[in-house]
Every structure is written in structure tokens, then in C-alpha cells.
Image (cartoon, rainbow, N blue to C red):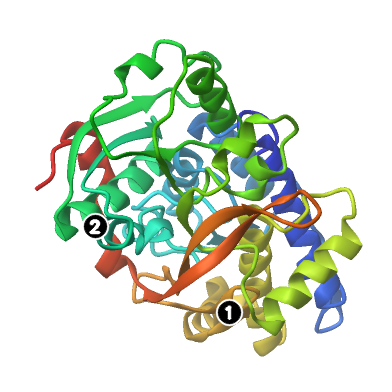
Amino acid sequence: SVDSGPAAAGGADGYRGVAMAVKKIGGVIDGHPIKIVQEGTDQTGPVALTKVRKLVEQDHAQIVVGPGSGDEGAAVANYSDSQPGVTFLDGIAAGENETLKHPNVFRFAYGDGAQWVAGLGTYAYDTLGVKTVATLGDDYSFGYAQVGGFVSEFCQAGGTVPKEIFTPLGATDYSSVVPQIPSNVDAVYIALNGADAINFLNAYYAQGGHAKFIASSITIDQSVLSAKGNVKDHLIGVTSATPVADTIDTPAWKDFVSAYQQQYPKGFSSPSVWAAGYYSNAMAVFTALQKVSGDLSNNQAAFRAALKALTLDSPTGPISLDANQNGIFTNYIAQTEQGPDGTLVNKVIKAVPNVQESTYTANGEASRTNPSCP
């Protein structure tokens, strides 16, 4: 998982999610103790490739869960093609091509970045009355997918996007970005990672910004909402889409939150998409291993067949795989609110069920070079 860069706090929560899954199944599969080997990344492809090669070629990992960021996911997926005896489960890396082009990669949580914002474009246009939007995203594969997914759906609903802005991942100075945001749009859609979102908001409000915001899943994740300082309070009332909303009203989610808070009292106030995503992929591994009694012979054929057939009872709802081994799940439209204890939470407004890549994929890479609506 990520342990440096703007998403480092989220990456730490990914490790917590895996540890929760190990504890959930008792640490043993068919009499064999589970051994977890961790390697940290920095959200770049070259580092992810170096680390995954160490895990496979030196540590002899048989199954890899991760990584956590888009360009990392592409690098690991490319590497997977040369390792037929190793199975790769995406952590929460959500570029669009990982499962479309690489048959040795499985992704239970939560599909690609375009799927993570399913329902938001239509909701913004039809319910919020937003007709024109400028977008701001991180300049890498996940940012393209999150922007592309929103733009595709928003434009199909009838909206227009006169301006798209992409900024370097890990940027600290957004003072020159703020003036680029048009003043005559109804809202600004933000798709920035953890620290990037906080740095942008600091710059925006320091320069007197007052636009209405709509946010991607990663911008209103607990890795941002739990950060120190007052800037996050500007996210109160912001509408977003996310596969992991804090107030999902199901026994499975409530049990997961309770277990997380007991196991990690110094973690976030509520599990982030990192914790839930890594937990879900790890639980998919353990569930499939149990079904085949730990059999990893014949290039893990039985294990992979069990993964393909699995419908996972995840904390956020059932997750199954499509023909490309990509997750089908329920997404949520949410609004950020302040809870009674002062913490910020994403309150569910509506569920968007059966989110499939074939429906919501947006070719985000094309969005980066063609910002106008179709």
C-alpha cells in the first residue's frame, strides 16, 4: 500500500483493512498460517514495480493484494502478465485498464475510478440544478477516471463542462491554479487525493474563493475529513459519490465500523475507502482459499475459479465480478455533515446499485485531452 505522498494516510488505513481481514478469518487457512509481507509505495508506477518484484521474486509471494493508486495499478498489472503462477488482487488502484487488459488481475473493490462516481453527474444536473461545471483533478490515471466518469454522466444528463484542469499529483502550491477556475460556472467538481485536496482548499479560500463544490470519492474520504485543521470544514454540505459512505445503514457496515474502531482507536473516526477496499480484496482471497482448501496448484486454477464465482459479502454490500474480473457493487450519493461529536461524516442520500464498468466506464484518458462534452 502507499506509505508516502499525498495518500500516505489512506495507505496506512489499507494496511489496517488487511489486518482486520486476517483477524476475521483467524489467521489460518486449512491449517496453514497466513503470512503477510508488506511493502510501501509512493503512488508512482516505477516504485510500485520495484516493490511488487521484490514481493514476488524475493519474498516468493503467491498472492498480491494491492497497490492503492492508479499509475501503480497499471505498473503492477503489466507485471502480472509475466507471472502466471501468482494471483493479483487490486488494492484500491482504480485506473480503467487494470482488469480490461490483464487476465491475472482481480478487482473486488471497487471497480475503476469512473465507477466510484456513478450517479453523481445525473444527481448534480437533475437534483442539484447544476448545469455548468469546471473540474479539477490530479494528473494521473485515477484522476482521469474520476473526472472522466463524472463528465461523461453529467454531459449525458445535459450539462456542460467549459473547463477541465489537471494538476500534478503531490502538488503543494495551488496559488496559480485558483485563478484558472471560471467564475461563471454553477459548481466546481474536485477529484484530488488526500493532502492535495487539503492544499487546494487552503489556497482557494485564502484567495477568497466561494464556489459551490461537488466532490469525487477520494476528496471526501476519511483520509481528508479526519485531517487536522479547519479547512476540511469547508467540505460540510458538499455532495459527492463514493463506494464507502460513513452512514451506510446495514448490519454489515455497522459491524465493520465497530470492529475497526475497537481494533484501531487511533485510526480514522470511521473506516476509509482504503480500509474497506483492502479488507474486501483480502477477504475475497481468504474466502476463495477456504473454498478450495488452500489449493494453489496448477497455476492456482481452482483458486482463481473460486474468485470468479464469488459474490463477496463486503462491509458495503455484495460485490461480484464481471467477465473481466472487475467489481460490480453499490455506489452511494452522499453529503458531508458534521456529527454530534464534531467529526465529519458522509451521510448517504441514495444508493446507486449494480454499478458495472460497461455502464459507467468513461475512458478518462481521453477526457484528459478532450475536455468538452460529447
- Residue 72: which disc? none
x, y percent for residue 22: 81, 68
Question: Of callouts 1 and 2, which one flags the residue occurring earlier in the amino acid sequence?
Answer: 2
In the image shown, does 294 or 344 lie closer to the viewer? 344
Residue type at numbered disc 2: Glu
Is 32 located above or below residue 178 in the figure? below
Is 67 located above or below residue 356 in the figure? above
x, y percent for residue 29: 79, 79
Residue type at numbered disc 1: Phe
Q: Is residue 195 left or right of residue 31?
A: left
Q: Provide the secondary structure element on which disc 2 rests.
A: helix
Q: Tell me, yes or no, if residue 5 can be seen here.
A: yes
Distance Cα–Cα, label 1 vs label 2:
36 Å
Q: Provide the secondary structure element on which disc 1 rests.
A: helix
Q: Residues within 10 Å of mark 2 (few under 14, many from 20)?
A: many
Residue shown at 52% from the left, 31% from the top: 44
When asked about the image quadrant of residue 27, the answer is bottom right
Residue shown at 74% from the left, 60% from the top: 18
Is 288 located above or below residue 138 in the figure? below
Q: Nearer the viewer, mark 1 or mark 2?
A: 2
Residue shown at 42% from the left, 47% from the top: 78
When asked about the image quadrant of residue 20, the answer is bottom right
In the image shown, does 299 or 80 lie closer to the viewer? 80
Q: Is residue 38 left or right of residue 144?
A: right
In the image shown, does 245 or 5 lie closer to the viewer? 245
Quadrant, the N terminus: top right
x, y percent for residue 37: 77, 51
Query: Which residue matches tag 1?
Result: 303
In the image shown, does 296 or 99 lie closer to the viewer? 99
Query: Which residue matches tag 2?
Result: 153
